[in-house]
Image (cartoon, rainbow, N blue to C red):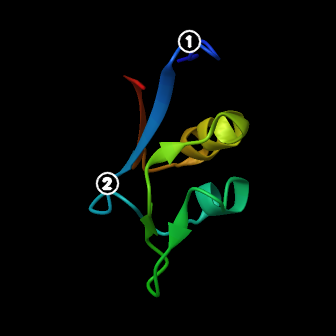
Amino acid sequence: MQAPKGNGVVLQVHADRTRCCGYGLCAQLCPEIYKLDENGLVYVEDGTVPPELEEQAREGASACPAEAITIEIVAA
């Protein structure tokens, strides 16, 4: 899912903590977006992805073996 850059499109990240198994791959690949709590489960503080972090955010979501992270394209 590629968002056209500069077209008023924003990526929004959602983490399903009920599916997270705590591997932490997402946070290793994009610690600016994906955070881990004291139990090692993913959460996002602000799901809006800055344009400069789009690639890393996608890599982090793709790396999740539990498929607990989804990325949605929303209008700005």
Q: What residue is at 47 percent from the left and 87 percent from the top?
A: 38
**Extreme residue toward the bottom, this view:** 38
User: Crowding at label 1, few (<14), some or many (≥20) Cα neighbours within 10 Å?
Assistant: few
Q: Which residue is mark 1?
A: 7
Dot 1 or dot 2: first in sequence order is: 1
Q: Is residue 29 left or right of residue 38?
A: right
List the residue tagged with mark 2: 16
Residue 73 to residue 49: above or below: above
Task: Pick the residue in front: 66 or 48.
Answer: 48
Coordinates of residue 50 in the picture (x, y in percent): 61, 41
Residue appearing at x 57%, y 38% in the figure: 62
Q: Position of residue 25 (x, y in %)?
A: 63, 58
Look at 53% across and 49% down and name the residue there: 64
Give the percent coordinates (x, y) of residue 54. Answer: 64, 35
- Residue count near mark 2 (Cα–Cα under 10 Å), binned few <14, some 14–19, many ≥20: some
Q: How far across and down, in percent of the image, does residue 7 sit?
A: 56, 12
Amino acid carrying label 1: it is Asn
Q: Which mark is residue 36?
A: none
Amino acid type of the residue that numbered disc 2 sits on in the rendered structure: Asp
Please name which of the two marks, 1 or 2, marks the residue nearer to the observer. 1
> Spatial distance from mark 1 to mark 2, Cα to Cα?
28 Å
Q: Is residue 38 left or right of residue 62?
A: left
Q: Secondary structure at mark 2?
A: loop
Quadrant of the image containing the C terminus: top left
Q: Secondary structure at mark 1?
A: loop
Q: Is residue 33 left or right of residue 45?
A: right
Q: Does 56 appear above or below 41? A: above
- Residue sticking out furthest to the left: 18
Depth check: 63 or 13 in front?
A: 13
Q: At x 61% / y 42%, what residue is drawn?
A: 57
Q: Quadrant of residue 63?
A: top right
Name the foreground residue: 58 vs 7.
7
